[in-house]
Structure formats: C-alpha cells, structure tokens
Amino acid sequence: MAPSSTCPEPVFAPGEKFLSFEITRVTPLPDIRQTAYEILHLRTGARILHLHNDDPENLYAICFRTPPEDSTGLPHILEHSVLAGSERYPLKDVFNELHRASLQTFINAFTYPDKTVYPVASQVKKDFFNLARVYTDLVLRPRLLRETFLQEGHHFEFADPGNPDSELVISGIVYNEMKGAYSSPDSLMFKAIQENLYPDTIYRNDSGGAPDAIPNLTYEQFRAFHRSYYSPSNARFFFYGDIPTRDCLTFLAEMLDGFDAVTVESHIAPQERWTAPRSVCGEYPIGADEDATAKTAVNVAWMLADNLDYETVILLEIVSWALVGSAAGPLRKVLVESGLGEDLSPVTGLEKDIKQLAFVVGLRGSEADRAAAVEALILDTVARLAESGFERDLIEGALHQVEFHGKEISRGAYPYGITLMGRVFHTWLYDGDPLAGLNFPAMIDDIRRRWDRDPALFQKVLRRWFLENPHRLLSVMKPSTTYQSEQEARSREALRVMAEALSPEDRARIASDALRLNRFQTEPDPPEAAALLPAIAIGDLSPEVDVIPVESEIRQGVTVLSHDLFTNGIAYLHIAFDVAHIPDELQPYLPLLCRLMTGLGAGELSYDALSKKIALKTGGLGAHLASGFRIGGCETWQKMIVHVRMLYRNIPDAVGILSDILFRGNLTEMARIRDLIFEDRNDLQAAVVPSGHLFAKRTAAASLTLPAYREEQWHGRSQLKFIHALAESWDERQGDFIRKIDDLKSRIIRKDRMILNLTADRQGLNLLEEAVGTIMTALKEVPSTICDVPVPALPSRVGIAIPAQVSYVAEAFPAPTYGSSLAAPLFVLSRLLSNGCLYQKIRVQGGAYGGMCLYDPTNGLFSFLSYRDPHLERTLAVYEEALRFAGDGVIADEEIQKAVIGSIGALDRPMDPAGRGFASMIRHFSGLTDEERRRFRQAVLSMGNRELTAGALQYLAGVKNRSAVAVYSAGEKMNQANETLRPSLQIEPLT
Ligand SMILES: [Zn+2]
C-alpha cells in the first residue's frame, strides 16, 4: 500500500473500554501521520501506547524500568538471558530461532542506563504476532536456567578443560562483550561523564557491566532482579504500524491474562543540583608503543533540565544544534580553530537517554595541561553568545532541520517505529506524557511564536542552563600505554588470589560445572520443544520481488534514472561519477576529496557560511564511494556518489548549492582543510575497536578482488595508514596534496559515464529535472579510459596489533556474483552457518559476542567474522570445521527451511523512499535486473538439501587454499598464537 499524508480515523473514544483495557486518550497527529491511543490494562496497571498509521512494517516493544543497583551488569545479563527460553518455549536459545527463521525486519533487545527494551518488527501480520507472542512470553515468564546465567553472564573454567590444575579463566558472553566496550576510547569517555555527572543516582552504575564487577554477580541476585522489575505493572507496551488497535489489544489481553497488579519500586530519583562545578580525570588504552602526544580528550558537561520539562528540552535541542550541530556552530568553530586540540570530541552533543539531560562539548587530540584553557574557551564563548545572541540563520537552520526530519519518511538501518519509540520513552519512562516529544511541526510553530514575542529567547536558555548552572563537570581522559597491560595484570592477579583460595573440592566443582555447561550447550533441543514455536511456512512466502519504479532516459548525453515514489514532499538527488579510471596511487585520496568537497566553502561563501546555507536549504548533503562487480563477475564498477535531500520548495536553492560545490568549490581554506583531515583520521582510528570485525574483513578481503581492494583503500586500515601519514607530515605535503585533489576533481567531475538518479513523486521529479539542467550544461565532455588494475599481491595472513582485550578474526574467500547458479546456495548457506555452527561454537561455547558468515553477491565475497572474541586459533579452526560441515550433506531439511525463511526475510528488508531510489541505482551499476532477482529468489525458495550440498561442494572445490585471514588483536596474543599457527600471521602495527 502506498503511504499517505494523513492519519487514520480514530476507532475508539477516550474512556471507552475494550476487553480488559480502558482507552485513556486518543490523539490524532496528522502532521506526523499518526493516530495515538493511550491505553491502560485495568488489572495490572500496564501502560500501552499504539501509534496507528499506514506503515506495513509493524513494531512492538516491551519496556521495563530497570534501575541498576551496582555495576555487575545485572540488567544487561538479564536482557540476554530472558530471550533464551520460557516454560512454554523450553528451548536453549529462542532468540536465535526467531532471528533465523522468521520474516523479522528487526529483532533485538537494548539495555539502557535505566530501562530495558525488547523490540520486534515485521511486515507480515502473521509473522508479527508470532514474534510478539513469543517475545512477550519470554520476558514475562523466562526459565532463567543456571546454565544460561553462566553462559551469558560469567563462569570459571580451566584453560585446559579436562585439567583442574591448569590456569583458571573467566568467560561469559556479556563479560567479553563489555571487555570490548571497555577497550573503546569513546565508550570510556562517555562512561566517565555519566558516572561523574550524576554521582548520587543510579546513573553512577554501569547497567552494561564493568568487567571487574561482573564476576561478583550471583545467580540468586539475577533471578531476584527479574521478579522485582519484569512484571506488567512495571511495563510499557509500545505498538506502531498499520495493524488495527483492536487486533493489538486482543493479542495483549491474552498475553496479560493471569497477571495481577504488584507494587514495583522502580522510581528514578533525580540528581540534586550542585552548587559548584567539579572535575574528573581518567585514562583510556592506547598501544604499548604508541606515542601519547596529543591524545587527551577534554570535555565539559552540564546537567540540564529534566526530560519531563519538554518545553525546555526542545529549546535545548535547538540551542545544542546551533552551538555545535553544524560546521557553522560558533562553539564548534571556535574550539576546532583554537589549536588547543585536533577536533571536536566524539561525545559532543545532547544526551537524552537519562532522566536529566546532559550537554557535552570538548576537544579530542589535546593535552591534559590545556584542559583549563579548553574549559575557559568554552565558557567565554557561551558567555559571548548569551550577550550577543545567535545569528538568525543559525536558529532558522536548526528549525529547518527539525521540520525536515519530522517530515521525512526515513528508515535507515532501523524501522521508523524505533525512532518514534525512542522519543516516546524520553518522557513516558519517567511517567510523563508519551506524546510530548512527537509532534515536531506543532512544536516548531510554537517555538517560532515564542521567538517572535521574545527575540532573546535563546540567550535566556544559554544563561539559565549553561552560564548560571553550576552543575558542570570538567572531564579529562588521558591516553595510557600501560592501561591495557595493567588491566590484564589486575584481572590475572584477582583470579590468582581466587584460585589460591580454592580447595581441591572447589576445583573439582568448577571442572564439573564447566563440563555440565558444555554438555548443556552441545545437546540439541528436543524436536517437540522446537515444534512449539509458532512459525511461518515456506508456502506463506511471496514468490514476488519488490519492484522499484524506474524510468531511464538519456538527456544531454547523460543517463537519468527517475523513481516516481511518494516521499512526503521531499526530493532526493544522487549524482554518480565514475572513478574507475583514477590511477591506483590516487585512489586513497578519494575519501578526502568526498570530505573536502562537502566540507569547504564554494563560490563567494566560506565553509561556515556555506554550512549555514546547507542547513537552511537541505536535509543533508554528502559524498561517498562505492564499488562492486557487474553481474557475472567479470567487470567491476567504482563510483563517487554525491547526494542531496531537500523539501520541494527548496529544490532550486539546494541544487544550486550542489552545483556551487561541484564547479566553484574552493581549496584555499588551509586551516579548515587541515582540521577536516585530522578529524577524519581521528574518527577512523576511533572506529577500529568498536568495528574491529569489519576492519578485519576489509583487510582480509583486500588481496582477493578489486572491489574489496578498493574498499580497504577507501574505508579500511590502508586508508587509516594513508591519512595518518598525511596528517603527520602535513606541513611538507599540503602543497602537493592540494594539487592532487584539484587534479582529481577535474578528472572526475565530467559527463563521461555519469549517472543522475532522481527520487520523488511526479511533481517533485518535474522540479528536479528542471533544476539539474544547469549542472548538466556546466559539465565537461571529456572521455576517459577505464584502467582495470590487477589487485596487487598482498600478504594473505595478517595480524594487526590493536589495544583491545578481545580479538576480531576474519577469513575471506573469493565468491561468485549474482548471475551465478551458486549465488542462491551460498546465500542460504551463509545464513545456515551463521545461525548454526558459528553461533554455537563461537558465541555459545566460545563466549565471543558474535560469530558470523557473510555472503556478498555484489562484491563477490564469502567471509567468516568473529566479534569481541576471547579466542583466536580456536576460531580459525571453527571456520575450517564450518566449511567441512557445509560440504558433508548432513544438514537437516528443517534447518534449510529455516534458513530459506530467514533469507527471504533478509531479501525483503524494507527500505525508505530514498533507500529504494538508491538501491535501484546500485542495481543499474551491477546490471542486476528484476528478472534476475526473481530467478535468484525462486532458487532460494526451492532450496533443498541436494541443491545446497551440491552448490557448497562445487564452490569449495574452487576456492580451496584461496582464503585470506586477518586478525585484529593485542600484539602479545597474536605472537602467542603464532607459536602454533601454520601458516603464521604477519604481524603489523595498526598505523
Ligand atoms: Zn549485550
């Protein structure tokens, strides 16, 4: 069904009763296309909110208030454990079953500092209620077995499992997950602020769990926490989508049957406001040989208003955006240009997932002895703005951004329902009006009226919440080359003390517990238990592919693709330039070209003036790089894609900005260019630990195919090394750098093999077509030749040393693309292995946060990855085992059916209008037709044991000995592994 611009007619009136519920409030919100029902479950007091609309991707979430009492990670371990199984569904891991064998478009669970949320989403009504039914049963009536607690939380085991005299180690999935989190500078930085800004509240505790504290948690405490907080009386149920309210309530009435009201003490007390500012100093790990110069982060944080004071919250959102939200933000600008640090701290901005909001701002790449100067600069700037006020265009830009994002139908990686749910919980969780933060257009009108009446409105906000607010924290995070080793020595010492105190009986018990856990983990679920889960059948799946409307025509020698889609008054423009002809040695410059094109000034405008204009006239503008194979796998494509999104009324202005950027961009703002390069370097460096598996995959795959090699050059460690070296020798290299960027622009911004991609409804398309005419006329008509380079010989066994307490292990193989008869079997196989043996061996038994297998038919890669993994050699052995298993022909038909259902779910992942237009363009590059997609889908749907095994065998025979391995881990750990690993890893530092 096509989305519309109105909200559904209300079907209930306030005060009306239905089943065991009372409708307490009905609010049509036509501006955001929702009708909101607030509902009370009369017996338990459970609160329900339904946002009814015409989105077929329905979302359901159960939320409990779960204030943590300490940092043992209780809420987090419970979040993992309830999803294991319930009395009605007595399996070992129901979550994994739902994940792999349903049409879910989203299934997850989140632990926040004060709440735990369990959301599921699907586009198919039957599947949606299956998921919702099982999820509700799991959270309200979980089994919480001791084995689950040991597996998800923590347990002791002996390094050599059969030998109680060998070294004692701690394992557990959450334990290893949090070891990874505690290696990431960004998470440590935010943690230090949260714990010290709210020191007298529950927020001083880490709901996720501190690795040192997790082993103190007992099984009894764990069960007691569930009894206290997981009752309907402490729950909030959130529904979103096009399913009628009556159906949602009929379902929920059945689920809540048998529960009574209980008194739950989960009130979250506020932090008392300080009378004087405070400061705190902490450390984060860097590599043992890394230079510690210019690696300190200095942040200033304020505790602001309560989330319930929504009128103030929206003002604070606008002020926060005006201060630091764009390159023109005066506080951002003054900090970045001060020379006191390299770039803005990554935790900068407004934090709303806490009862009282915080605003944080600071610099990264600084020194501890500059902390006072950073703080003074921030305070002086705020004082100056409180005196003089913001420039009008900055506030207008902020208001335009709120309007744009309120109007845009945007899914991104998460369902749109998740975005609205997040806003709802900011007030609802603290017993406030759940709708307070939802109606953006109405709020903006209100702010405009207030601003007209009182031009000093935002100055007053600055004075009240920043200048005259003594609840302020100065936080300094210093790099430490010994943090990692000291942390490890401390854990080892704690374990040694514990081990020494153990009697022979204790040791025997640990050994037998570990054995019992292992038996529990490896025993299959009884088939009759698995049959209890409601499931979708293959016959329920649609054989049809979703067809994206596309019209293709050649205008002025350029291919123009148009997608006539309902976009709620927003137009999307992509311009794809070819970069396949750019010589190999210039390719690493392309990501910086993307960044500089959209981050500098153009025409008469300086970078900050242009940034203001971008905020006023567009919903976002940027450039990025993408590459892949054409169908059949013989040719590749490599593109630089520039994009802009805008309201219809701004199309001429927004396209004008884009045209200025392309043709009149200036490369003379040297200080700004330097800042952007340092910022990019720091962002990429900070991404390594949180996304170690993706970096490892890029490094491994780079030696295999050209698209993968480009991916590593543009987005992987090679890019980090390149930009790192550039930043280190910036003074000598800047002249040469600017010449190269200038040269690249003239080689890329030309008509040859360029593609225009337009997405909007008919009215918007007409406006867009008219506006892009000027760009086409201005483009040069120089033909270029593609030089398809061979991938250079790279080492195929690499270890990259990083300061982390856990490992990321990747192994990649070259694989066929779409168009090959092997594509469908490999697609299903990768899901089977991911959710089957990798999940089991790497996560469940190995204690890693994740283990997965990915097949990417666009880039021709088949890969194995592990995430926050305590093992290394063992994980590589599991990969080998997985491949053998794939060719053995022993996979049961039910398993294949589940993988087929999951595969179709993955193929049908919904996209927002911008995403659909973009996907259609990528299919155009790849030559992937709807006919080919139908063939592929059909092959997936009819996959059986015979087809799968034959495909796996044929594929494996062709890739034997062609794999590449990359490990990101601590140097010491890899040296140790190299003693036994054959072939061994070639170990290199990160940069
Ligand atoms: Zn977790």
Image (cartoon, rainbow, N blue to C red):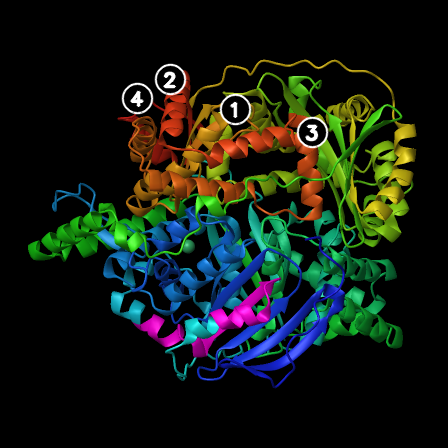
Name the disc covering residue 702, or none: 1
Chain-order first, disc 4 or disc 3: 3
Q: How far apart are marks 2 and 3 (CA)?
A: 32 Å
User: Could you tell me how far apart the alpha carbons at marks 1 and 2 are, in whole angstroms?
Assistant: 22 Å
**Label 4 with label 1: CB-CB less than 8 Å:** no
Residue type for callout 4: Arg
Q: Mark 4 points at which residue?
A: 982
Determine the secondary structure under disc 2: helix
Residue 970, picture quadrant: top left
Marking on residue 924: 3
Element type where label 4 sits in the image: loop
Alpha carbon separation for disc pair 2 and 4: 21 Å
Element at label 3: helix
Mark 4 vs mark 1: which is more N-terminal? 1
Along the line of sight, which residue is nearer the eye, 10 or 743? 10
Report crowding for label 1: few under 14, some 14 to 19, many 20 or more residues within 10 A (C-alpha).
Answer: many
Query: Where in the figure is residue 610, as x and y percent of width and height?
Result: 84, 46
The residue to which callout 2 is attached is 957
Instruction: Name the foreground residue: 651 vs 132.
Output: 132
Residue 625 is at least partly visible in this image: no
Residue 323 percent across, percent down from the top left: 74, 59
Q: In which quadrant of this rendering is ligand 1 seen?
A: bottom left
* Earlier-in-chain disc, 2 versus 4: 2
Amino acid of disc 2? Ala
The stretch in magenta equals 224-251
Mark 2 near ligand 1 (CB under 8 Å)?
no
